[in-house]
Image (cartoon, rainbow, N blue to C red):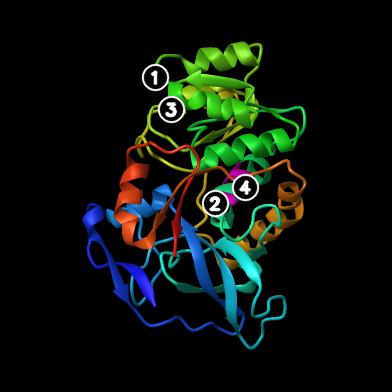
């Protein structure tokens, strides 16, 4: 099969397409013929050597997929050859085939279809896990989502509205309307406006219940000023910086919860659990018309370097898909 293999680390030029052996499914795994995958910031970090993937014979990036099951392991009971599925993996999705535990796969919503389904798994599960599973966001509460036009951001806006919450987002001026169109109640242009002051006005000086942050750095000290007493900040990325100084007394006095989280490093049972909860609570909302994946652009596998350059330039609104 053809796959993108990392044989060294650096710029987009290290993304090399090679022929490698097909993977073999384990007893509880399925073999998927990948129709498409999608880009995530973690892919760029992995390419630069900052975020290693799982141990593999060939280091193949890619953390989500949509495709068809073409073989199953001996103990597989919930999937069959021919099923159209999507899901998250620790790595290996930049390839024509991959293996994954059957309970990490999800049926593709009819309203979305195989062609667009790779835009769902990683960012939607990440946003759901951060806002709802760990942040406790429910009806009548409020959230602040940074990078509102990103893949995680566009999913987070819809999830917040889907559970009946109010949501404020930060984005550059050219992307704010896209966030509003998805349902954002407040859009803040981070290039010219102070999101701390805007959130204060938005909440009547009370603060939001949950902050979802993919930026890091000096955003953390400002996030603490945005969250209400006993609120939660969920850090799911560090696009800006991996280091920060905070007002520890404000954190203590406000009884603020600060949670750091990633999906890739979790054990299989945790990945299965959050996948299955997402299937039960969120997946039906695609076919009901409440949710839709936001797709910025599509590239062929041979153009993977150009696709990553597009993401690195922060030019996208929503997901960048790679068709195999």
Q: Percent position (x, y) of residue 178?
A: 54, 29
Measured in 3D between alpha carbons, the distance from the residue under mark 4 to the one under mark 3, in whole angstroms, is 21 Å
Question: Which numbered marker is on residue 129?
Answer: 4
Asked which secondary structure carries label 2, the reply is helix
Q: Which residue is mark 2?
A: 119
Which callout, 3 or 2, points at the residue further toward the start of the chain? 2
Q: Is residue 34 left or right of residue 113?
A: left
Q: Above or below — where is 303 with respect to 150?
A: below
Residue 175 x, y percent position in the rendering = 47, 27
Q: Which quarter of the image is occupied by the N terminus? A: bottom left
Quick one: label 3, few (<14), some, or many (20+) residues within 10 Å?
A: many
Q: Which residues are magenta?
A: 125-130
Q: Quadrant of residue 4?
A: bottom left
Asked whether residue 172 is in view, the answer is no
Q: Which residue is mark 1?
A: 191
Question: Answer yes or no: do the residues labelled 3 and 1 have beta carbons within 8 Å?
Answer: no
Q: CA gap, disc 2 to disc 1?
A: 27 Å
Nearer to the camera, 34 or 172: 34
Q: How far apart are labels 1 and 4 at the CA level?
A: 28 Å
Do the numbered discs 4 and 3 sit on residues whose CB atoms are within 8 Å? no
Out of 154 and 57, give the one closest to the viewer. 154
Q: Which residue is mark 3?
A: 219
Residues at marks 3 and 2, CA–CA distance in whole angstroms? 27 Å
Where in the figure is residue 199, as x and y percent of width and height? Answer: 57, 17
Q: Give residue 83's quadrant in the image.
A: bottom right
Q: Residue at x 56, y 58 (%)?
A: 115
Q: Give the label, 1 or 4, closer to the camera.
A: 1
Quarter of the image for the C terminus: give it.
bottom left
Q: Residues within 10 Å of mark 1 (few under 14, many from 20)?
A: few
């Amino acid at each position: 099969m053809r796959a993108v293999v990392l044989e060294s680390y650096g710029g987009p030029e290290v993304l090399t397409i090679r022929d490698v052996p097909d993977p073999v499914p384990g007893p509880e795994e399925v073999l998927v013929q990948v129709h498409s995958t999608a880009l995530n910031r973690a892919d760029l970090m992995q390419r630069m050597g900052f975020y290693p993937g799982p141990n593999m014979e060939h280091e193949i990036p890619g953390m989500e997929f949509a495709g068809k099951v073409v073989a199953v392991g001996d103990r597989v009971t919930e999937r069959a050859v021919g099923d159209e599925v999507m899901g998250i993996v620790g790595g290996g999705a930049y390839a024509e085939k991959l293996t994954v535990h059957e309970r990490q796969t999800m049926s593709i919503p009819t309203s979305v279809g195989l062609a667009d389904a790779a835009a769902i798994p990683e960012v939607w599960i990440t946003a759901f896990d951060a806002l709802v599973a760990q942040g406790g966001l429910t009806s009548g509460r409020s959230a602040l989502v940074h990078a509102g036009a990103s893949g995680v951001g566009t999913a987070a806006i819809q999830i917040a509205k889907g559970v009946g919450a109010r949501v404020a987002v930060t984005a550059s001026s050219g992307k704010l309307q896209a966030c509003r169109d998805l349902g954002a109640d407040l859009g803040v242009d981070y290039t010219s406006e102070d999101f701390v002051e805007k959130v204060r006005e938005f909440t009547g000086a009370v603060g939001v219940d949950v902050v979802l942050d993919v930026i890091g750095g000096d955003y953390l000290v400002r996030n603490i000023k945005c969250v209400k007493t006993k609120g939660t900040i969920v850090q799911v990325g560090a696009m800006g910086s991996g280091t920060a100084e905070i007002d520890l007394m404000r954190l203590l006095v406000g009884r603020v919860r600060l949670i750091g989280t990633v999906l890739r490093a979790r054990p299989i049972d945790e990945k299965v659990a959050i996948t299955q909860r997402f299937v039960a609570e969120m997946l039906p909302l695609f076919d009901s018309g409440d949710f839709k994946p936001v797709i910025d652009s599509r590239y062929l596998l041979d153009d993977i370097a150009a696709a990553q350059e597009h993401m690195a330039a922060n030019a996208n609104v929503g997901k960048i898909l790679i068709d195999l």
